[in-house]
Image: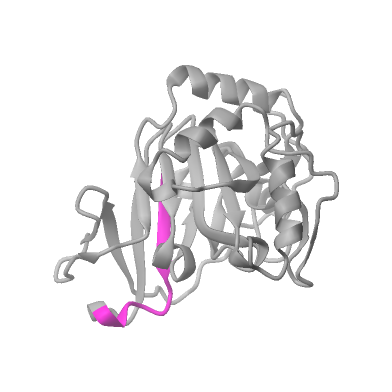
Amino acid sequence: MAPDDVSGVCACKGIRRCLLCEKLKENGRLEANNPKIVHHFLYDPEMRLAISKDPGSASFPFSGVFLRQNFISEEEEEELIHSMDQEVWNQSQSGRRKQDFGPKVNFKKRKVRVGRFSGLPALSQKLVLRMQQEPNLAGFQPVEQCNLDYDPERGSAIDPHLDDSWLWGERLVTINMLSDTTLTMSLEQGLPEAGLAEEVRVAVHLPRRSLVVLYGEARHRWKHAIHRVDVHERRVCSTYRELSAEFLPGGQQAELGAQLLNTALSFQGAPI
């Protein structure tokens, strides 16, 4: 499929917006009349600190983010993107396109089944083995992979959110491809322990071909987002998710979890 193939109909719902639906409705997203106070920080992966961009604000330790630059080579990136572009990209919200490799899930009703899930894609097998060599990813067994395609011409973005923690486990793993971007971590309610009562944002720079892992507070407390202004060129990412304790040995749904893992790790999958 051509990477610049854009349908005339977007998939945005509710408050979600992309450039296409904004043009169709002849208006953009309205900004709040009253600008709010936001404290901006930049993540330093070597020191694992959130460094203040604002005068008068102190830096603070920022845990739960692991970044590995050059996790994949240029040749591997080219091979992965070529393989993805041979498959159908489905329209998603906020100007994104997606390819899903995972079980059928209803998060509201907390129901999950194998459905048409046939496994993770073959090219992911060597990447998962490489992930497991990282100390932060020991024992990592992904049960779902989601490929997302961002394009500035579509106004692609993903709003601040927390990933589900009923089905998905402790670590969220993403490989960033084709261009650099910024992952914005945010706490709307502020950070009282740092003396910050207003919203706090921490910018995590993601170089092209890097791997980022979110865990701990960065996974469960801080929302994460990719803002439209941080998508300068086409960007593709692959996010891998593991099972929560409920679906692992000893959990209430361990049998179903074992079935999902066996399917995922066959590495014979096609997008759903």
Q: Is residue 136 above or below residue 34?
A: above
Residue under the point 57% across and 65% down:
30
Q: Residue at x 42, y 46 (%)?
A: 212
Residue 259 position, x and y percent, is 76, 51
Looking at the image, the residue that sits furthest to the top is 75
Residue drawn at (43%, 40%) of the image = 211
Residue extending farthest to the front is 250
Where residue 39 sits in the image (x, y, percent)? 30, 69
Q: Is residue 232 visible?
A: no
Is 23 or 269 nearer to us in this picture?
269
At x 61%, y 26%, the residue is: 123
Tell me which corner region of the image, top left, top right, bottom left or bottom right, holds residue 246. bottom right
- Percent position of residue 33, x then y: 47, 74
Instruction: Give the percent coordinates (x, y) of residue 3.
Output: 65, 27
Tell how many labels: 0
Answer with left or right where residue 98 lies relative to residue 236.
right
Question: Is 136 included in the stretch rendered in magenta?
Answer: no
Q: Kindly tell me whether residue 109 is visible in this rendering.
A: yes
Tell me the quarter of the picture where residue 38 sits: bottom left
**Residue range corresponding to the magenta coloring:** 181-193
Q: Nearer the viewer, residue 39 or 64?
A: 64
For the N terminus, the image quarter is top right
Q: Nearer the viewer, residue 17 or 234?
A: 234
Q: 83 or 166, which is in the foreground?
A: 166
Indicate the quadrant containing the C terminus: top left, top right, bottom left or bottom right. Answer: top right
Relative horizontal placement of residue 58, taking residue 97 as reference (left or right): left
Residue 185 is inside the magenta segment = yes
